[in-house]
Amino acid sequence: MSYYKTLGLEKEPFSTSPDPEFFYLSSGHKTVMTNLLIELRLRRGLSVVMGDIGTGKTTLSRKLVQSLKEREGFEFHMIFDPTYDTEHIFLASLIRLFGVNADSHNTSRVELKEALEHFLFQKVVEQSKTVVLIIDEAQKLENTSLEVLRVLLNYETNEYKLLQLVLFGQLELYSKLAPMANLMDRISFKYTLNAMDEKEMAEMIHFRIKQAGYTGTVNLFGEDALREIYHYTKGYPRQVTLLCHKALKAVVMKSKAIVDGRTVKEIMESEINNGWSIPNKTTAGIKGMIA
């Protein structure tokens, strides 16, 4: 029997896979989701979401995809690893991703851009679709790829952009965008995700347990355990998820009813000895939004 069933759970509550159903929307995540959906509906063009490692960017991108699936008129595409050596390779990849009828191997870069422009015009103007390109790990984009995206954002009518672009990336993405003034000034919405505060972290833990099917009246994590978890993770979602998973396994192995502070301390003493890095709750970069 799986450990989570022993605790009265139907599913594993603290998997690190980016499952939108288990994603707790903190105040920062809610702000991002609300603004992104507005930007996409208005076809404003470029949105950028940055954050430190483990702040929930990837899962947030999956949550956005899930939300777009529920809305009519959106056609969306996603790139998970935007590592392209040349401009031509990136253009060819976009041609294949969008399903454009063009020979990407024997066509010049100019012709590939024209094919993409024609595709976007057909979809957006003639068919009234909203075409969205979501790029995760956007800090990996080379300058040549960023220049391609800038050109695609130039395709527009008098009222709106033909391509809606959402970049999710680590904080170093800003240092890549900053020197490109002609791309920076196209950003319609920009936000930097921070770690959660202690209250939101506790809410996230309880939310995931409930999503996993727990119906018990006793909280699986005591108040002292929550304090210790926040102390060690500083509210970074990925770190919280990893520690909670280890804590639930520990209480099952020790035949305990709930996770207490001592259990968390014992786990962390062992983990720190094995190289667990305690994060600093600091986030650099540009915070907030640009309307």
Image: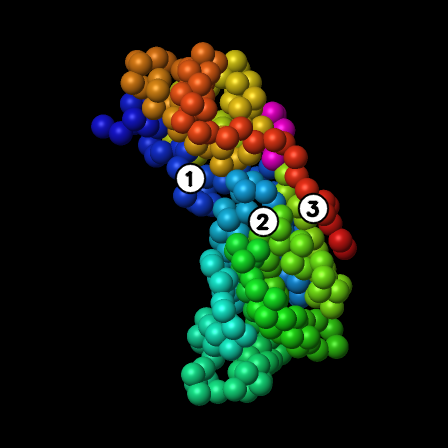
- The residue pinned by badge 1 equals 16
Residue drawn at x 61%, y 31% is 280
Residue 8 appears in the rendering: no
Residue drawn at x 50%, y 30% is 277
Compared to residue 247, the image places residue 124 above or below, namely below
Horizontal arrangement in the rendering, residue 237 relative to residue 163 (left or right): left
Query: Quick check: is 197 in the magenta stretch?
Result: yes
Q: Which of the 4 image quarters holds residue 263?
A: top left
Residue 291 image offset from top left, x and y in percent: 76, 55
Residue 107 image offset from top left, x and y in percent: 48, 87
Image: magenta residue range: 195-199
Q: Which mark is residue 170?
A: 2
Compared to residue 35, the image places residue 245 above or below, namely above
Residue type pointed to by label 3: Gly
- The residue pinned by badge 3 equals 285
Residue type pointed to by label 1: Thr
Q: Residues within 10 Å of mark 1 (few under 14, many from 20)?
A: some
Q: Earlier in the sequence, mark 1 or mark 2?
A: 1
Q: Nearer the viewer, mark 3 or mark 1?
A: 3
Secondary structure under tag 1 reads loop
Residue type pointed to by label 2: Gln
